[in-house]
Amino acid sequence: MTELTAGAIAVIDPQNALGDVLAQPHQVGDALWRAEAAAVPKREYAGGVVVAGMGGSAIGGELAAAALGDRAVRPLRSVRGYSLESWTAADTLVLCSSYSGNTEETLACFDDATARGLDRVVVTTGGELASRARDEGVPVIGVPSGMQPRSAVIYGVVATLEVAAAAGVGPSLRPELEAAAPLLERLVGEWGPDAPDSSRAKALARELNGSVPVFYGAGPTVPVAKRWKSQWNENPKLPAFWAELPEADHNEVCGWERTAELARMHSVFLDDPDVDQRTRRRYGPTARLASPSTLIAPVGEGLLQRVLSLVLLGDLASVYTAALDDVDPSTIHAIDQLKAELAE
């Protein structure tokens, strides 16, 4: 594909993955309403909040923690696996997030939390998780069905922030979330399919097209780098990787010496003003070693807006990359095959 217009993309995007990304500004308000409707009890938890989930259902928790930043006064962390950490405090709230409601790892964490006597909240469209939660009187934050789990990222971010505020992890970011929606709406206009080919998301997709990207984050952009990596995996079905600075400067940077012998690689550095200035100094020298490279600056007045703007940019660029390669961004055949084999 050469044109990145709405009509051209629709040909390879029958499930309208692009439309789900473009709806992110509207999802903010809907997510706030759904979180409020769940009536999560307000009580301070000394152990903070643990978000249990996998894939697209888990990243919302990590992005929320990044957006909260140093305003958090208690832990807000994520668990990706079949159980909570052995040292999880007795006074901890567990937020179980599974879009389908049938993710086996998340169901196992729900049961683990039940066995430990921990309070729980659930984010899901339904399935076994919603059934168990309702049987046990656990609050359920409902999410609209009909999209891929990764497309519900805004619901995960908002739900986590609202639960974290109710649990005393940090202040409510509701006013900031409400203010973020108009910004995202403006960015959809600037980066969406009706924007010129030179617009930021389209230009980035063309710049990375045909390469194996490595996304570098630091501080609040670390979960964003993870999000971009997984979006390139699932949407255009491409290998992609992420790493964190300054750690990558102590090992991974050496690997760029031989990339030209193996594959066409391209590094992308996700910046933010809240990144430790000592780490930000590393961006330029690291980028020159990990060449070719691109530096991405966020848009927005506050940390929350900047995190969400980067999520939108990466989501759009990954869908555009899929379109450039004539790949349906919604299909996940490899994951479906894995699940089928594991079910045998």
Image (cartoon, rainbow, N blue to C red):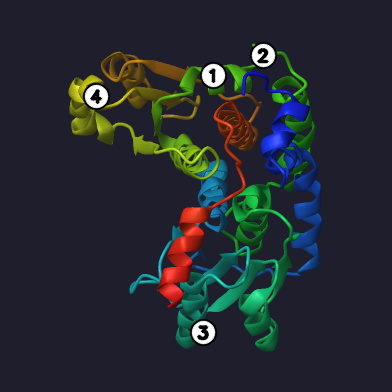
Q: Are marks 1 and 2 in contact (CB under 8 Å)?
A: yes
Q: Nearer the viewer, mark 1 or mark 3?
A: 1
Q: Nearer the viewer, mark 2 or mark 3?
A: 2
Say which element carries label 1. helix
Tell me if residue 32 comes above or below residue 219 in the rendering: below
Label 1 vs 3, first from the N-terminus: 3
Q: CA distance from mark 1 to mark 3?
A: 48 Å
Q: CA distance from mark 2 to mark 3?
A: 52 Å
Q: Residue under circle 3?
A: 114
Label 2 vs 3, first from the N-terminus: 3
| Residue 226: quarter of image | top left
The residue under the point 58% across, 16% down is 203
Q: CA distance from mark 1 to mark 4?
A: 20 Å
**In the foreground, 6 or 105:** 6
Is 315 on the left or on the right of 109, as rendered? right
Q: Residue under circle 4?
A: 259
Tell me if residue 199 comes above or below residue 11 in the rendering: above
The residue under the point 45% across, 37% down is 225
Three-letter residue code for mark 3:
Thr
- Give the numbered dot on residue 206: 1
- Give the numbered dot on residue 197: 2
Say which element carries label 2. loop
Q: CA distance from mark 2 to mark 4?
A: 29 Å
Asked if one can make out residue 305 in the rendered structure from this viewpoint, the answer is: yes
Tell me if residue 302 comes above or below residue 50 in the rendering: above
**In the foreground, 9 or 220:** 9
Around disc 4, counting alpha carbons within 10 Å, would you say few (fewer than 14), some (14 to 19), or many (20 or more)? some
Where residue 84 appears, as percent x and y from the top left, is 41, 72
Say which element carries label 3. helix
Where residue 120 appears, as percent x and y from the top left, is 58, 75
